[in-house]
Image (spheres, rainbow, N blue to C red):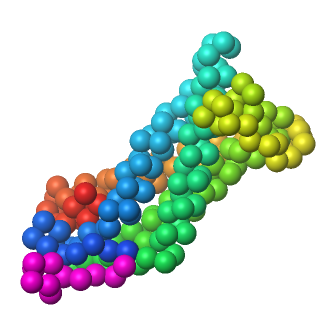
Amino acid sequence: MSPSGREARPSGAGPIDSRHPDGEYTRLAKWFHWTTVPLLALLLASGPTIRFAADHPKMVFYTVHESTGLLVLLLSAARVAWRLRHAPPAMAAHLPAFERFGANVVHHVLYAALIVQPLLGFFTTNAYGFPQRDATAFLGFIDVPAFMAANRALAVQLHWAHSLLGWLLVPLVALHVGAVLYRHAVKGDGTLLRMI
């Protein structure tokens, strides 16, 4: 314990103090997390609704969705790379074993999904023959080279996989948020405060 009353932690974890009795994540870990949250919310909201957009703004919706997806991919890849070199704070000792196991599973599946889902979307648009260039350029002005030739049959399969994983992300995110809010509001522990 340091003179300030804050206990030193692993490189990926912040100190333990009165506000964070179960430890906390570092500033960079929090930045990765809270930057991803609104981007993921935008993706989950825009994905299922694009088909209902009128023809003229539809390409704008696609550009926003695809650009946001690529941002999440880049952010998630950087986050995983950083996480591999910086251990997160240990889970609180008072958590039951099944909650520890469930939290680990959900975290790992979320990390994987945040890499796989944007890749599926990127491959899908390429297979349809619409890479992120010209009217649908990344962020509206950065052309991304085509990754593959158009292949309608492959595009349909990739599109189904992308849609399925998108729908699976909804209950996964709900489970993650619900568990954290349960620990905070019902159990009154420091789970939520670890990431704030």
Quadrant for residue 7, please give it. bottom left
- For the N terminus, the quadrant is bottom left
Residue 49 vs residue 137, the one in the foreground = 137
Q: Tell me if 5 is positioned left or right of 171 in this view.
A: left
In this rendering, the answer to whether 168 lies above or below 184 is above
**Residue at left offset 82%, top offset 35%:** 128
Provide residue 30's location: percent of width, then percent of height. 35, 59
Provide residue 163's location: percent of width, then percent of height. 64, 42
Determine if the magenta segment contains residue 80. no
Provide residue 88's location: percent of width, then percent of height. 38, 74
Provide residue 132's location: percent of width, then percent of height. 72, 36
Residue 95 vs residue 192, the one in the foreground = 192
Majority SS type along the magenta span: loop
**Is residue 109 something that shows in the picture?**
no
- For the C terminus, the quadrant is bottom left
Q: What is the span of residues highlighted in magenta in the rendered image?
A: 1-11
In this rendering, the answer to whether 97 lies above or below 146 is below
In this rendering, the answer to whether 156 lies above or below 180 is above
Quadrant for residue 51, please give it. top right
**Is residue 4 something that shows in the picture?**
yes
**Residue at left offset 22%, top offset 75%:** 15
**Residue at left offset 37%, top offset 74%:** 12
**Residue at left offset 28%, top offset 81%:** 9
In this rendering, the answer to whether 178 lies above or below 84 is above
Q: Tell me if 27 is positioned left or right of 145 in this view.
A: left
What number of labels is visible?
A: 0
Q: Tell me if 185 is positioned left or right of 81 in this view.
A: left
